[in-house]
Image (tube, coloured by chain):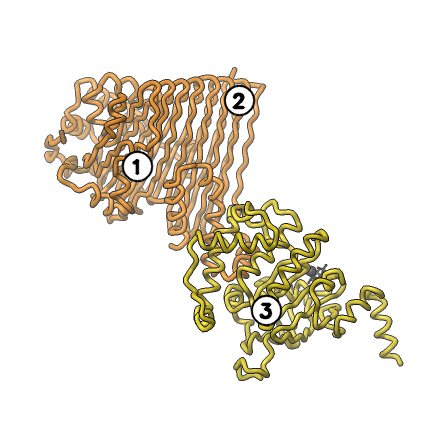
Chain colours: A yellow, B orange
Amino acid sequence: MSDGNSNGTTPMFEIENLHAEIDGKEILKGVDLTVNQGEIHALMGPNGSGKSTLAYVVAGDPRYEVTEGSIRFQGEDILEWSPDERARKGLFLAFQYPTVIPGVSMANFLRLAVTNVRTARAEEIAAEGGSAQPFTPREFRRLMREKMALLKMDDAFATRYLNEGFSGGEKKRAEILQMALLEPKMAVLDETDSGLDIDALKVVSEGVNNLSGPKVGMLLITHYQRLLNFIKPDFVHIMHDGRIVESGGPELAHELEAKGYEGLRARTAEAAAS
Amino acid sequence: MSITADISETATATGFSREGVEAVSRARLDTGAARDARLRAWELYESLPMPQRTDEEWRRTDLRGLKLDRLRPYAALDGSGVSPVRALEAAGVEDAAAQIALGPNAGVVVQRDAGTILATLDPDAAAQGVIFTDLATAYREHPELVERWFMTQAVPASFGKFEALHAAFWQGGSFLYVPKGVTIEAPFRAFSLISEPGAAIFSHTLAVVEEGAQAFMADAFRSPSLEGQSFASAVVELIVEPDAKLRYVQVQDWGRNVWNFMTERATLAQDATLNSLHVALGSKFSKASIGSHLRGKNTLAEMLGIYFADGDQFFDHHTWQLHESPYGTSDLEFKGALKGNARSVYSGLIKVFEGAQKTDAYQQNRNLVLSRTARADSIPNLEIAANDVRCTHGATVSQVEEEHLFYLQTRGVPRSEAQNLIVEGFFRPIIDRVPVEEVQEFLRTAIARKVGI
Ligand SMILES: Nc1ncnc2c1ncn2[C@@H]1O[C@H](COP(=O)(O)OP(=O)(O)OP(=O)(O)O)[C@@H](O)[C@H]1O
Ligand SMILES: [Mg+2]
């Protein structure tokens, strides 16, 4: 398991006893989570329980310090990797609050991003019979327009500055557009559903479903069963105070919807007492 | 055609002197009036004190490293027989052949040191009465035109110590004259190059756009980094007559041995429009004073600036929005990035004269500091003597946000490229305001190169 080989028995993505702190305050207090190829996991939990923190730490946010534990991707320890290395290896984070960067146009930035990621995966792409030759601006524009059409995004977004003046829902769509272009192997989607109207939720969920598949792992952070009606998770986890306190199948999310976190906790306490 | 008068008698002497002025005047085959003007300017230069750090405009400027007495007051005059493309390439200009081609350009003047290497003008423009050539030739061939504007209205010799020195020793430069009602779309392009260190270069740009006429002029100051101090003194005079339009783009990309002093004033007559862009990338030290006189009613001056300093470069920009008449609009945006140990000073004044009602003046200076040891100072100023005006100004000095870098990195973009994107994005709004493809392309490349240094 620790030989680093990606054979059938090595999980694609594995977090073990992860502790992380920010500004000296410990937020993650021993997270364990394993995602295999093709699996969709939902991560739920009350506000402030550390869900976004986990997402940032996976992406390599330098504000957080990992004090204990490990994150392995395809058998390799990724903690020493820079955020861009992680992305080039196939990790992706759709941000809860995407960053606005003035003056940087979506098209220019994404072409650069896609070129970097594809160049890093040239061997793999070649093995699948494709070519990692960088797209010309024109080719890229076409590809981008295609993906934008699927997400029902107006062409004008291509030339707009990164998230500048985007509405909440537009930002979320733009995150999924980026994911569609980068074709990650392991994606963490942090509350991609919040702020979306019901039609947008359908469109975005369809987009996400198109990107999932037997080779892709996903971690959906969400507060609502609503999203899980569209994207069916294989597993549901509940985080509380920096730990995953309960894991189960899709029924766990339904139970949570009905009882709330308080109800769940009461049920767990009862079970522990009896 | 080329001037071959002999200045070898004093060509090795250093320091500025009255004899030097006379030698330059002889070499330039000056008329009596031109010679007298030089000598009067020399006397003025001698009578004016060197700027002190107690002077507001020089408070943050350290001139101690400038050794005027070790400079030769003129460089080689003879530019004949030099290939312009080779000269441009040696000065670091890319795509040189295209840069000096007629067709994409309406006219080209290339000068190296003080010698003219190339002066061309599109025949169609010439047929419409346009003049574009090196200033000395223009002075000889059209004395009445040149004398009317040369250091009389925009930047007189009495302007200051360095301007007086310039008036005494000016040699290179170009003259653009666009007659009434004539519109020329393609740019008039002038290059000022340095190939020999240790000399003073005095380049003078005089552009006159007559009533209802429209033109685009691009000035480039380029040289490789050489051993030994060079001194560049440029004066730019832009005369925009009633209802005329001028676009002026200046790129200063001197080698790192150059001390650059540039004074520019535009005068706008009624209903005139000026769109200017100043780009500062090179030199060791650069002090630029850039001003617009909104003299007539209802004028528009758009003044844009981009500077990017690295290493131990020092850039100092002073801007002047001088509202002398009612209904004038000035819109100034200067943005700078700094890295290494670079320093920049920006100070800008909006001055609204008495009676200049309905003035609308805007001034913005933003700085992006990319290293801990770089520093930017920004000093905006208002002086308003009319009561029905709108004046807005703002200044910021900030750093690249880690959050921005992180976001871009999570998409697979390496940190250095992410930084480049952010810096380009910082300048982007200004680049977008100059609707000239070639200028935009040049800026993108120049910024990327600077970020990569
Ligand atoms: N710089 C900081 N210093 C101290 N505490 C911090 C800092 N940044 C975040 N936190 C805390 O970390 C905790 C976890 O935050 P996180 O954003 O991971 O929660 P979350 O589960 O994503 O919540 P939500 O559902 O509201 O999005 C919160 O209590 C937050 O206040
Ligand atoms: Mg969160």
Q: Quadrant of the N terminus of chain A?
A: bottom right
Nearest the viewer among A234 and B376 is: A234
Give the chain of mark 1: B
Badge 3 element = strand
Mark 1 or mark 2: name the one nearer the start of the chain.
1
Expressed as whole percent of the image width and height from the top left, the position of residue A22 reads 64, 64
Instruction: Give the quarter of the image for residue B281.
Output: top left
Disc 3 Cβ-to-ligand 2 distance below 8 Å: no
Query: Mark 2 — residue?
Result: B359
Disc 3 residue type? Met
Dot 1 and dot 3 residues touching (CB under 8 Å): no
The residue located at (59%, 64%) in the rendering is: A211
Disc 2 residue type? Thr
How dense is the environment of label 3, judged by Cα within 10 Å: few (below 14), some, or many (20 and up)?
A: many
Q: Nearer the viewer, mark 1 or mark 2?
A: 1
Disc 1 residue type? Pro
Is A107 placed above or below B238 here?
A: below
Dot 2 and dot 3 residues touching (CB under 8 Å): no
